[in-house]
Structures are given as C-alpha cells and as structure tokens.
Image: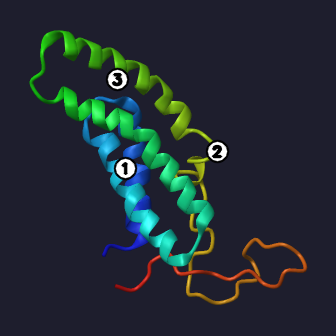
C-alpha cells in the first residue's frame, strides 16, 4: 500500500488535468487518488474527510463514465447525445474541484492536518481548553 502522502500529491497533480479535459486520465486519476486516500481516512476514523473524498469521487463519476463510453464505438446519434452530456457535465467540474469540499485536498495545507510522528505538537492548530493537538502520521507504515 502506498503512503498517504503519495496519493495526496497524485491528487494535486491530476486536478489540472481533470479540469482541462484533454486527457482521459485526468478525471480517472483524481478518482483513483480519492479512493486511496479514503482508505487512510477510514482507517483513522475521520468521517468528515471521508465524506469529502466520497463527494469528490461521486462528483467526478459522471464525467468519467461519459469519457469511457465515448472512447468506444457508438451509434452516431447516441455518441452526439453523450458528447453534449459530457460538455454539460464538465462545466460543473471546476465548481466541484474549487469548492470548499475539495479545496483542502489541493490547497496550501494537506487534508491530513496533523502530519508527523504521532506526538503532541504545541504548534499544531487546536481549540483552547481541549488539550494539545496531536500529530497523526501522514505516511503510515506498510
């Protein structure tokens, strides 16, 4: 199993490709990275991030399905219909990828907010009165 940091970088790298729409792998690789990262957050029990990754995965599903369908031979009328549908569906993709739901995965801070060795970190963000924030390893051992 690859480390979470690898999949986070993979996700960041493929966001622009997914937005451009020129490479069929862009959306596919965003979905692959989202699924792999979801495994880590499920293992850590982080529901909020799991839901964010699930929304990203679901939000890109229609684009991917249409891209795959259009990569195969189809009757001309059906192909035209799917092409129009892909154009409409792709218009919503930038809004999804720039939404508050997905911004944490490519913004200046990683979605795994406390990366490190699993020890208390006084510099980590935390709420006053709730104790020290803990750093959770970003790259879990194999």
Q: Image quarter for residue 119?
A: bottom right
Q: Which mark is residue 16?
A: none
Which residue is at 33% across, 14% downward? 84
Which residue is at 37% across, 57% downward? 33
Seen in the picture, residue 69 relative to 128 is either above or below; the reply is above
Is tag 3's residue or tag 1's residue first in the polypeptide sequence? Answer: 1
| Residue farthest top in this picture | 77
Q: Position of residue 117 (x, y in %)?
A: 56, 87
Residue position for label 3: 86
Residue position for label 1: 31
- Cα separation between marks 3 and 1: 17 Å
| Within-10-Å neighbours for mark 3: few <14, some 14–19, many 20+ | some
Residue position for label 2: 100
Is tag 3's residue or tag 2's residue first in the polypeptide sequence? Answer: 3
Asked if the residue at tag 2 contacts the one at tag 3, i.e. Cβ–Cβ closer than 8 Å, the answer is no
Report the front residue among 62 and 30.
62
Seen in the picture, residue 80 relative to 135 is either above or below; the reply is above
In terms of secondary structure, where does tag 3 sit? Answer: helix
Seen in the picture, residue 116 relative to 23 is either above or below; the reply is below
Which residue is at 43% across, 48% downward? 57
Whether residue 33 is visible: yes
| Within-10-Å neighbours for mark 2: few <14, some 14–19, many 20+ | few
In terms of secondary structure, where does tag 1 sit? Answer: helix
- Cα separation between marks 3 and 2: 24 Å
Quarter containing the N terminus: bottom left
Q: Position of residue 80 (x, y in %)?
A: 24, 12
Tell whether 72 sits left or right of 68.
left
Tell whether 8 sits left or right of 73.
right
């Amino acid at each position: 199993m690859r480390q979470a940091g690898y999949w986070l970088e993979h996700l960041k790298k493929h966001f622009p490709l997914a937005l451009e729409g020129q490479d069929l792998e862009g959306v596919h690789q965003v979905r692959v990275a989202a699924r792999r990262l979801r495994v880590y957050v499920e293992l850590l029990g982080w529901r909020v991030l799991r839901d964010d990754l699930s929304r990203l995965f679901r939000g890109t599903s229609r684009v991917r399905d249409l891209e795959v369908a259009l990569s195969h031979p189809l009757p001309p009328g059906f192909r035209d219909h799917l092409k129009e549908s892909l154009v409409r569906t792709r218009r919503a993709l930038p809004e999804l990828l720039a939404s508050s739901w997905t911004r944490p995965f490519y913004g200046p801070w990683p979605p795994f907010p406390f990366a490190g060795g699993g020890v208390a970190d006084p510099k980590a963000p935390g709420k006053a009165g709730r104790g020290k924030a803990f750093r959770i390893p970003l790259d879990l051992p194999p």
